[in-house]
Each structure stands twice: as C-alpha cells, then as structure tokens.
Amino acid sequence: MFAITNTTNFYIPILIIGAIILIGFLVYYFNPKQVILRKLSKTPLKRISQIKNNDLVKINGKALHVHEPFMAPFSLRRCVFYSIKIEQKVSSGKSSHWKKLVSEEKAQDFFVETNGEMLIVKPTQSPRNYISYLITDKETGSGTFNDPTPEFEALLKHYNIKSTGLFGFNKKLRYKEAVIEIGERITVAGIAKWKTLSEPVPEYHYSKIIELVSEGKEKLIITDMPEAISLH
C-alpha cells in the first residue's frame, strides 16, 4: 500500500506538468497566426504572369484600393481592411478579466500589385471566404488615473460606450486596431481564376484579371505579417 501511494504521488505532478505542456502546445499550434504561416509555407509563390487558372498560389505585394478606401476608426488611416476591438476590464470577486465590448472587422475588394502586375482579392464576410491575421499597430486606453484622449472619447461615443462609471471614475478600457493601409506590403493566397470584367475597374486597364478566390476547404488568406513575406 505504501509503495502504491508513493508511486501515485510521483506520477501525479508529472501528469499535471505534461497536461500543461500539451495545452500550451495546442494553443500555440492552433493559434490563427501559426495556422496561416503553416498554410503559406506549403503554398507556392509565383509571379502573377506565371499563374494559371485554378492554381493555388500566394503573392507578396502592395495593397491598392479598388473603391473608395475605408478610414480606420481611430487612426483615420486610409485602408482596405481593418479590425478593431474595444474591451473593458471587469472584476468578479478576487479575479478580473477583459470583457469584449466591440469587435468589428471590415474588408473590401482590393488589388495586390507586384512588379507592375496586379490581381484582385474580394473578401466577403457573409459567408466568410477568408482567414486573416493582421498586426495590431495602434492601441490606446483609459483607466482610473488615465483619461481617454479626445480621439478615444469620440470613438467610444460612436459605439455608445461611456468612459466613466457610477461615481464618475474612468473605466479601464483598451482599444486595439489593425489595418491594411493603401500601399502596405502584404501576403495573400488563394485559388486563381481568370475573370472577364463586366465593367471597367478604376486604375486597371485590361478586360481580364486574375482573382484569388476560396474554393472548397481552401479559404483566401490575407495577412500583413512580415514573417509571411519571407516565406518561399
């Protein structure tokens, strides 16, 4: 009995440590960033002029607008894609966590230009035909002794969020913004389809263009990660 108890006490910490390592690995492995990098590493990089119909390809190039660009909600940068998040820190007993108040993502059709050649990408959200990972490059926030900037206050009002609580103290809020700016170097991937344009596209002077599309299990991939550009 004594030997069994000792053996059990020996293995329990090992099992706990093993479970923690396994959970950490799974969180890392299935993180959207790692999923996209793995997919891109297996996708051939081609020049646009080398692409054939139905090729699965990735392209590195500059993002250019097809239509009037978006304005990023906080930074007011001209962009074709933005993702924002507003969170509030809330307490529950002795613990606290960040509660999501706003999560918004908008994407529009855009060109990708490389070596003087262009293709077009048309992300849709309903149904969602893409997976993406954008680098958060604008952040702001407020707290008890940290008033929100006028720009942040205006943004909070736009989303009907009050910056103060019951007794007039500032809420602990944070804002994160990620965008694909006009002219930013990005990586996209998808199935190539030659399309005949039914009507002219501004800034594009040809009757046909390659569009990257999703097909079956192959979703469009859109990212501005520097690591993706270095993949071959």
Image: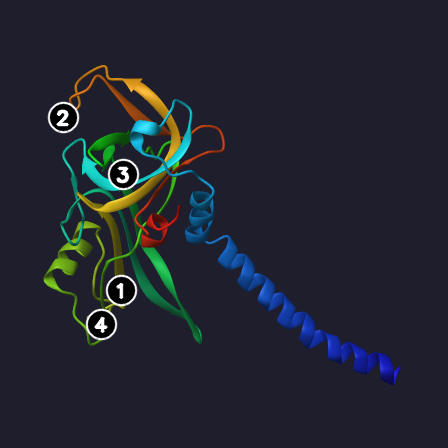
Separation (CA) of disc 2 from disc 4: 53 Å
Q: How many badges with numbers are in the image?
A: 4
Determine the image quadrant of residue 80: top left
Separation (CA) of disc 3 from disc 2: 18 Å
Identify which amino acid the numbered label 3 is placed on.
Answer: Ala
Q: Nearer the viewer, mark 2 or mark 1?
A: 2
Judging from the image, the colouring scheme is rainbow
Q: Identify residue for label 3.
A: 107
Residue occupying the point 42% across, 35% down: 219
Element type at mark 3? strand
Identify which amino acid the numbered label 4 is placed on.
Answer: Phe
Considering only vertical position in the picture, is 18 above or below 228? Answer: below
Q: Quadrant where the C terminus lies?
A: top left
Residue occupying the point 58% across, 67% down: 21
Say whether disc 3 or disc 2 marks the residue closer to the N-terminus. Answer: 3
Q: Identify residue for label 2.
A: 202
Identify which amino acid the numbered label 1 is placed on.
Answer: Leu
Separation (CA) of disc 1 from disc 4: 16 Å
Q: Position of residue 229 (x, y in %)?
A: 33, 48
Identify which amino acid the numbered label 2 is placed on.
Answer: Pro
Q: Position of residue 11 (x, y in %)?
A: 74, 75
Cβ–Cβ under 8 Å for marks 1 and 3: no
Labelled disc at residue 173: 1
Say whether disc 2 or disc 1 marks the residue closer to the N-terminus. Answer: 1
Cβ–Cβ under 8 Å for marks 3 and 2: no
Residue occupying the point 14% across, 26% down: 202
Considering only vertical position in the picture, is 210 above or below 179? Answer: above
Separation (CA) of disc 2 from disc 1: 41 Å
